[in-house]
Image (cartoon, rainbow, N blue to C red):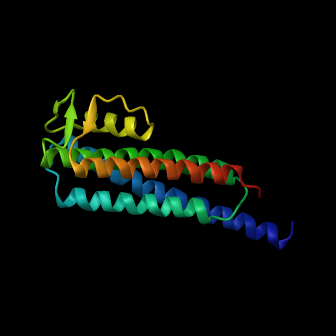
Amino acid sequence: MGSADGSEHGATRRLTRAAWLWAGFISMAMVVSFAMDVLGVPYGFATVMLVTDIVLALALGLGWMVAAPAVRHGRAMVVGLLLMMVGLAVWNFSTIYREMSSSDPKAFLDGGRPAGELDSIDTLYFSMAVFTTAGFGDIVPASEAARAVVTAQMGFGVLLIGVTITRLTARK
């Protein structure tokens, strides 16, 4: 083993450690968000801060997927990061949809009628339907703001899939 192998191993360990720290931070943020919802803590400044943190984490994760050097076990790390980012994106957009429906009961339609305030399960279901492009049509965005956020989620999903495919098929 030469020094190049040692430095590659060190780079892999540093990237793996950073990914685990990042995952831990995001997992804690998601648990806090879920606990706020279950305990009935009103959404407001804390929600805005949480969503901002998660958006930043998604941007950093996507940036890492694009810029990370090809290291040993790179494909496994990309797949792990993809799974974590999908979960984060679905959860983050779910939180945004919950806040939107809370502040504007006509932001979404459910069966053609204003949905009112959607609960966590409804918004998680809707967010997953948008991300997977299932689009069942039972809950639909009605306001301009809701349509803009749904469009952003669709765009992020396409970007994430494209970057993942590019990273997985790249030659070392």
On the image, the x and y values in percent for residue 110 come to: 21, 30
At horizontal 28% and vertical 28% (from top left) the residue drawn is: 138
In the depicted structure, whether residue 73 falls above or below residue 133? below
At horizontal 28% and vertical 44% (from top left) the residue drawn is: 34
- In the image, farthest residue toward the right: 1
- In the image, farthest residue toward the bottom: 3
In the picture, measured across the screen, residue 14 lies left or right of residue 91, that is right
If the image is split into quadrants, where does the N terminus sit?
bottom right
At horizontal 33% and vertical 33% (from top left) the residue drawn is: 125
On the image, the x and y values in percent for residue 135 come to: 38, 33
Nearest the viewer among 9 and 65 is 65
Which quadrant of the figure has residue 38?
Answer: top left
On the image, the x and y values in percent for residue 149 come to: 31, 51
In the picture, measured across the screen, residue 102 lies left or right of residue 13, that is left
If the image is split into quadrants, where does the C terminus sit?
bottom right
Nearest the viewer among 5 and 50 is 50
Looking at the rendered structure, the number of numbered marks drawn on it comes to 0
Nearest the viewer among 57 and 15 is 57
In the picture, measured across the screen, residue 30 lies left or right of residue 4, that is left
At horizontal 32% and vertical 62% (from top left) the residue drawn is: 52
On the image, the x and y values in percent for residue 13 come to: 65, 62
